[in-house]
Image (cartoon, grey):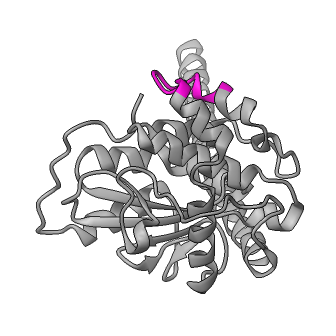
Amino acid sequence: MSENNQEGKRAARDRLIKQREQEKARERRRRTLIVSTAVVGVLALAAVIGVIAANSGGKGNKASKSGPAVAPSGATGKDSLAIQVGANDAPSTLTVWEDFRCPVCGQFENAFRDTIHELENTGQLKVLYHLVTLIDGNLGGSGSLDAANAAACAQDVGKFSAYHDVLYRNQPQETDDAFGKSSRLIELAGKVEGLDTPDFRSCVQDGTHNTWVQKSHTAFQNGGFQGTPTALLNGESIFPKKGNEPITVANLKKWVAEANKGKQPGKVTSSPSGS
């Protein structure tokens, strides 16, 4: 009788342990679904906000420098308005239109930065960045313009990608025009090895590439795009979704793999993600 009781207790205990494990597994799946849905939902909502911004945005309040547009070193594309990161012969191209003050752009970069760099570093993808000044036009200030100019100054010495990431990692609130201060942009340059030099400081303070940035913004307006960020994979919009599929890390990798099927990766000579 005693042995039967012990076996019964063990069986009950085993059932209880199994039940608890099943409950934990269900809870993990539930949390994963909630987080995944929240990320997609935030990005989708942000895209709507971006549409509003695109429809109302202007060029900002800061007067542009007189004279012709000075493109940063290595700028490419039509009218040299794009900054490329990644191998020239990468089989796929991601075109991104961004505003450094745009909170949705910050969410996009923070969500997909590591994946994009992975695809760049393995020669699967090159990225063409176009800089926009929507928030300056909507909220006033000059942070969009000044940050874009500073990023172009970083491109002059081959450090665009690293500085681009630093700016988004330290993005202020949308209503805070912190990037409108040269001192803040120079301070952040200190996070990129070898960037904070007298030439870089002069480029930032003088607004060397301001007219080029504003020309890029005009191209954005004339392009009929709906908001920032705009992300196009080989010319097809993928933000906030591609067809009926929402953009996620897994989907982005899948879309690039599908586009690159049967193609050789590009030759990467150095890490596009910088220091």
Corner quadrant of residue 201: top right
Quadrant containing the N terminus in the rendered view: top right
Q: Residue 110, how many percent across, how many down?
A: 59, 45
Corner quadrant of residue 219: bottom right
Residue lying at the far top of the rendered structure:
2
Q: Any magenta on residue 183?
A: no
- Drawn side of residue 172 relative to residue 30, left or right: right
> Magenta region: which residues?
187-198
Res 128 visible: yes
Residue depicted at x 42% and y 27%: 275
Q: Any magenta on residue 194?
A: yes
Closer to the camera in the image, 253 or 47: 47
Residue depicted at x 36% and y 63%: 76
260 vs 153: above or below? below
Residue depicted at x 42% and y 80%: 236
Q: How many marks?
A: 0
Res 24 visible: no
Q: Residue 70, how many percent across, how many down?
A: 50, 58
Residue depicted at x 19% and y 40%: 269
- Drawn side of residue 255 relative to residue 66, left or right: left
Q: Residue 71, how many percent across, how many down?
A: 46, 58
SS majority, magenta: loop
Closer to the camera in the image, 168 or 46: 168
Closer to the camera in the image, 47 or 8: 47
Q: Residue 79, how many percent across, how many down?
A: 42, 72
